[in-house]
Amino acid sequence: MSDLNRRAVLQGAAAGAALLSPASALAQSGDEKAFRAAVEKGHDAAITRLQDWIALPSIAAENRDMQKGAEYMAALAKDAGFQTAEIVQTSGHPGVFATLDAGAPKTIGLYFMYDVKQFDPAEWSSPPLEARIVDKPGMGRAIVGRGATNQKGPEATFLAALHAIRAAGRKLPVNLVLVAEGEEEIGSPHFHEIVRRPDIAARLKQTPCVFMPFNSQGPDGEVTVNLGAKGVIECELVASGDAWGRGPAKDVHSSLKAMIDSPVWRLVEAMKTLVSPDGNTVVIDGWDEHVRPLSAREKALIAADARASSEADMMKALGVKHWIGDLEWLAANERLVAAPTANIEGLVAGYTGPGGKTILPHKGVAKMDFRLVPNQTRDDCVAKLKAHLAKRGFGDIQVNVSGGYDPTETAEDSPLIRTTLATYQKLGITPTLNPRLAGSWPGYVFTGAPISLPAGHFGLGHGSGAHAPDEYYLIEPTNPKIAGFDQAVMSYIDFLYSLAASKA
């Protein structure tokens, strides 16, 4: 899941226990003191649990430890108090379905992902599977490891909340239905098979909402609540001599380019037809046909978010000096929310090792992702991509879709969003709203038919570096505006009580 989350300024946050307001639903329960004691007592065990989880990387793109990952997720759920935890097989890699019956009047849906992105240990300052706790200058003590922030850190923090409630001798204020997958990082190609299994779908439909644990705080403690996320298509475009009927069937000497066509040049020419000359606007035939323009309310939310955030800080964090077309800050933010994209993740052809190798490659591959906005759909856009290429004589270019899904949206006035905002307020934080995350998560399986539920994210804490070297999750931040691990655990307990007390 992308951590390119639009942030606003934290207002009125205080350190330590002040992050939990006396007005919170948890405080009203009278159990806050007992929970705090349990959280503190369970701190070391919770950190070890997270480190052990990071040590087992489930990487769908490499077919690495996928069954082990599902088994480990099921074991973590059972250990946290779920009475049932079933490994659910799919047409691809398995997922997990778990239930926790606390005897409460209300049941809440919960989404987890336990797979992580690939990594090259040589690029890391700390081994990516050792989950060492290190000092990050200006930030504090942090766990560094693949999956630390995306998404095992926040999820382990939520599980720590369940452990603390049980250790305090209390029952959860809500029942839980958990669906977890091991393919999020390849576009969740089979997750719908889990969610739409009749018995699982029936259980989810009995809930008022689904949420995902998320360390929502920016580097200065700020929080933005996203009302949705872009959809995504992940695919490869493949040009080969075999499929084209021209060019070599195997790599040949480059001197032969004088008489033999190049599949790699053909791939380049095909890709050039997908976007404007600067690469910034998708020009696939009919691509914008169903794109919904920003509403006045959405523009107002984006403007408020832009005013409250720092353009200079964002540029510094991303290592850029200009936005597309030298756009002003507000216009760049509107484009981030509203624009579909075509991105080249990687190009692979021929020899890529040290020095040169004079060959004419027989095949070229472009790894691409396309971000989708309302009201685009994955299936419609894949069909348009293929038709666009075929119309221009590139029908031999293979479009191999590995994953993807539609955009997701949850109404601003839904009980889930209202409860999320109210809980942050009670915790001493005034968040801002953003129409949608520029990244993607498979919330469409919950917000779309047949489940049709509000879905979103909640949680305190900070981490960064998702998909990158030295990914980290703060445990003991130096900035008092950011919740440490124990405070983040308490925020999930408070959220569960808020959901129980809400009218949803």
Image (spheres, rainbow, N blue to C red):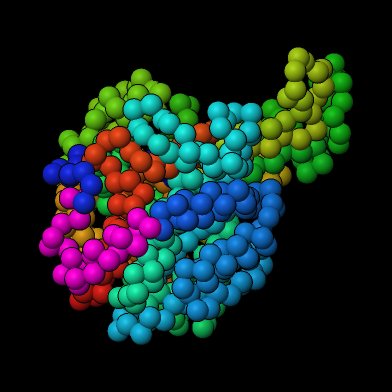
Above or below, 388 relative to 281: below
The rendered magenta stretch, by its main secondary structure, is classed as: helix
Question: Where residue 492 sits in the image (x, y, percent)?
Answer: 32, 61
Question: Where residue 125 sits in the image (x, y, percent)?
Answer: 55, 28
The total number of labels drawn is 0
Residue at (35% x, 32% y) in the render:
139
Above or below, 121 relative to 53: above
| Quadrant placement of the C terminus | bottom left
Quarter of the figure with residue 315? top left
Residue at (69% x, 52% y) in the render:
64
Residue at (20% x, 55% y) in the render:
20
The residue lying toward the viewer, choosing from 119 and 102, is: 102
Quarter of the figure with residue 15? top left
Res. 415 visible in picture: no
Residue at (47% x, 56% y) in the render:
45
The residue lying toward the viewer, choosing from 114 and 360, is: 114
Res. 358 visible in picture: yes
Question: Where residue 261 sits in the image (x, y, percent)?
Answer: 78, 27
The residue lying toward the viewer, choosing from 471 and 140, is: 140
Question: Where residue 372 sits in the image (x, y, percent)?
Answer: 43, 50
Left/right of residue 272 with respect to residue 427 in the rendered view = right
Left/right of residue 336 with respect to residue 59 in the rendered view = left
In the rendered structure, which segment of residues is drawn in magenta? 18-41
Is 21 contained in the magenta span? yes
Left/right of residue 427 with respect to residue 212 in the rendered view = left
Above or below, 479 relative to 380: above
Is 183 contained in the magenta span? no
